[in-house]
Amino acid sequence: MSSVICQLAGQWADHWPALDRGLQYGDGLFETIRLDSRGGMPLREYHFERLQQGLQRLYFPSQVLDQVILSWQQLSIPDGATGVKLLLTRGEAARGYAIPAIPAVNLQWQFFTSPEWRWKSKPEGLVTGVNPVRLGNQPLLAGLKHLNRLEQVLARQAFQPGWDESLMLDQDDLLVEGCMSNLYWIKNGTIFTPSLAKAGVNGVIRRWLSAQRSILETEARLDELYQADLVFMSNALNGLVPIAALDGQSLSQAPAALAELRALQSELEACF
Amino acid sequence: MSSVICQLAGQWADHWPALDRGLQYGDGLFETIRLDSRGGMPLREYHFERLQQGLQRLYFPSQVLDQVILSWQQLSIPDGATGVKLLLTRGEAARGYAIPAIPAVNLQWQFFTSPEWRWKSKPEGLVTGVNPVRLGNQPLLAGLKHLNRLEQVLARQAFQPGWDESLMLDQDDLLVEGCMSNLYWIKNGTIFTPSLAKAGVNGVIRRWLSAQRSILETEARLDELYQADLVFMSNALNGLVPIAALDGQSLSQAPAALAELRALQSELEACF
């Protein structure tokens, strides 16, 4: 199933205005949210935390988050929905980049049924490769889940046959993330993840993970992954999944590291 | 006046679909076009040239340009329109970044009446400053007028009172362009403009200018502007305009260089 419901400057609707700034400039944010079996949002604090950071960095009024929460509370969740994408924009305004002082925010909720979660369907791990698309460095937008996603569109198009995911480097060939996931590796019992100071999306699971374990943010290159005991990825829908292969080369899945990942998978799934 | 007409997968409409990829990802392109007094598009070859480059780099089918031209030919231009913004997206598709093989392209034409052209209203030149927002470097998107414009939204918000425009540098502090314009300077009779290999929009007037004169593309820093005989900017709506001041400091407007700019302004205005 898939359905979308819009709320335009407070009014429910099933279409979108042609002059919306989200369309014109990508001037907005989104969240991809996994629901539990009762239609609840177990990791809501992490979704709303990032949304609030995005709203602040993009100069939205702070009360917009309250509008979003109120809108969510008014929704009835369609039967069979296992996920929802929230999209929020600065609404309609006069032509030009200048931000209206009081935006008439538009938002939409797109409900969907996921295919089986990747952490279940790929227990042995993902087949990946290094994406030829390099992410641009933009500290002012790094970490946010904003609507400017052309780099991801180009990166997805560059997938080779058989890839489940791909690894994104930045313009300096530093590791950042996956095309749709965050990236981690375990070495001698320590969990590492790339710094997102210049690029990337600070995922819900990435922040959930940082609340469960000590995670070391670092600037690192590809060779770190080949020397790791285990490499894994996360995203809101697919949970925590090991990487089996990178550009045709099998990656280590050392037993102790894999046991740690299995423990984390169980802790995460217990939330849903 | 301002009005918008949409063409969704070939059908005329006055709204926009909520699941359009232009809204979801910024997966599309736009052109801001100055019309002549008869509603014609004098610099159409430059607009369509950049659009075609964008379509190719974003993996649209090549015949999409023909759809755009056909759509343009079917329009009746509203009275009083002096400009039109064309916006084009990859339309609706299944959730996810993957590009549909045959997109059902959505497009819109937003007609408007400009305030008086800047080249007329600011003959003495623009008051500018260096924008604190640095552009990210992304060679795969550089030059295109695509829908991922959050950097410009943030940059516009950073304008100081009294600025007509601002100068954008990249992450390495190299000159790129203005927030809404291209940038040039004249030194000893030579016209220079920043390279757009890594960031920036390759404007219609920039390419028109390159067809009229020899323009040297270069990697340069701010100090080049303080040493120039004349600094000027261009955009499709405002034409060619000198810069009078940069961060409170007057810039040179040497008579020979200014005479060259006045000649170029006349040649450009003769097109309309």
Image (cartoon, coloured by chain):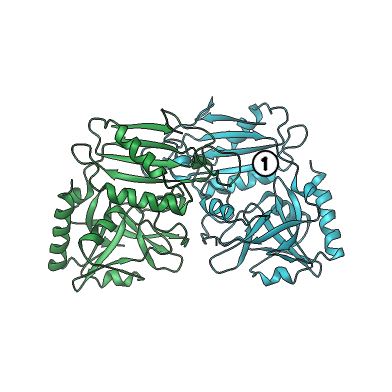
Chain colours: A green, B cyan
Q: Can residue A40 be seen in this view?
A: yes
Q: Examine the image and state in which quarter residue A64 appears.
A: top left
The answer for which chain carries disc 1 is: B
State how many labels appear: 1
Kind of residue at disc 1: Ile
Pointer 1: what residue?
B33
Task: Determine whether the residue tagged by mark 1 lies in a helix, strand or loop.
Answer: strand
Query: Which part of the image, by quadrant, shows the C terminus of chain B?
Result: top right
Query: Which residue is drawn at the image coordinates 38% and 44% (left, top)?
Result: A65
Quarter of image, res B219: bottom right
Hey, which quadrant is residue A30 in on the image? top left
The residue drawn where x is 25% and y is 35% is: A81
Instruction: Say if B185 sits above or below A1 in the image.
Output: below
Q: Nearer the viewer, residue A135 or B140?
A: A135
Residue B188, image x, y percentages: 81, 70
Q: Position of residue B142 (x, y in %)?
A: 56, 56
Relative vertical location of residue B121 with respect to residue B12 in this rendering, above or below? below
The residue located at (84%, 66%) in the rendering is: B254
Quarter of the figure that contains the N terminus of chain B: top right
Please state which of residues B214 and A17 is positioned toward the viewer in this rendering: A17
